[in-house]
Image (spheres, rainbow, N blue to C red):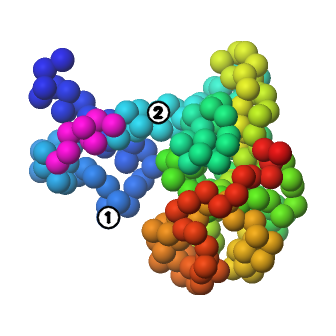
Amino acid sequence: MMKAEKGSEIITTICEYENSVAMPDNERLTYLDTCGIARLKDGNGNVKAQEAYANRCSEYLRFGHEVDLAACGAYSPYDVLKVCDTPEIFLKTGFEQHPMLYTQKHLFQALTPKSDYNPHRHGFSIEQVKRFPELLASPVVLANSPTREDVLLAILLATDAYDTPLIAGIKPDGTGNYGEREVETNMVLSVYSRQNFIRYFALLRDMDAFVFVSGRKIEALEDLSGLPLAENCSGLDIDRILQRPKCLG
C-alpha cells in the first residue's frame, strides 16, 4: 500500500470510530475540512502512534458493529459480544489474557432507559456503550468489590446522564459462547452507575479495596463528574499496582 493511501486509511479509521461514539470535539483527533475530507488536527504528528491508535479503533469498531447487530436483533442469540482483549493494566494485576465478553442481556439492560418501573436500568446510549473497550483499556481505578469476592471493579473515565461515574464489574476466568464456540473469558458482568457515588468511593478507600489508581485520570474524572475524588486517594501509591485482586485468589 502506498504511503499516502496508508495515511488516508489511518485517518479514515480514526474518524469513523470518533463518529461512531459521537466523540466530543475537544476529544477528537480528526475533523472534516471544507470538502468533507477527514483530516488530523495535528497534521502529520506521530505516524507510528497514529497507526497504533487506528489499529485499536478498528477493534473498537468491531465491538460497535456487534452492538449494532445485537440491538437490532441480527446477532446470534447464542453468542455473547466481545468487548476487547484483556487490557494491559488488568494483566499487570494478575489477570490472564482472555477475551472480555459481555452478554446481550447486560447490553439490553444498559440500553433500557431508567424509569419508575425500571429504576435499576442504566439508560446508556448506543454511542456510550460503543466506548466501553476504550474506557476499559484505561480505567481510573481498579478495586475489589465490597460485596463479591469474585469480582474486580473498574471505575471508568465516563459518566451517565446525571454526571455519576460509570463502574464495570469484571469476573475473571469464566466461559462464554463467542463465534459459535465456548471460550475462556474475563466476563464484563455489567457497566452501571450508582447513587451516592462519593460515599461508595470513600467506602472503597476505608475497606482498603483499591488495587490501582491512575493519578491523572482521577483528576480528569473529578473534572468530568464534579465530585471530590482525589482526596480519598491521598497517601496511596498512585499509578502502581497496590495489591493482588481478591477475585484472583
- Residue at position x 59%, y 81% from top? 234
**Crowding at mark 1 (Cα within 10 Å: few <14, some 14-19, many 20+):** few
Q: Visible in this render: residue 44?
A: yes
Q: CA distance from mark 1 to mark 2?
A: 22 Å
Quarter of the picture holding the N terminus = top left
Looking at numbered disc 2 in the image, what kind of residue is underneath it? Answer: Glu
The x and y percentages for residue 237 are 58, 69
Residue 49 in magenta? yes
Residue in the foreground of this view, choosing between 215 and 197: 215
Highlighted range, magenta:
45-52
| Res 192 quadrant in image | bottom right
**Crowding at mark 2 (Cα within 10 Å: few <14, some 14-19, many 20+):** some
Which residue is identified by label 2? 59
Quarter of the picture holding the C terminus = top right
Residue in the foreground of this view, choosing between 139 and 14: 139
| Secondary structure of the residue carrying numbered label 2 | helix
Horizontal side of residue 58 vs 212, given as left or right: left
Looking at numbered disc 1 in the image, what kind of residue is underneath it? Answer: Asn
The x and y percentages for residue 238 are 54, 68
| Secondary structure of the residue carrying numbered label 1 | helix
Horizontal side of residue 167 vs 13, given as left or right: right
The x and y percentages for residue 106 are 74, 44
Horizontal side of residue 3 vs 156, given as left or right: left
Q: Which mark is residue 26?
A: 1
- Residue at position x 57%, y 34% from top? 85
Q: Visible in this render: residue 140?
A: no
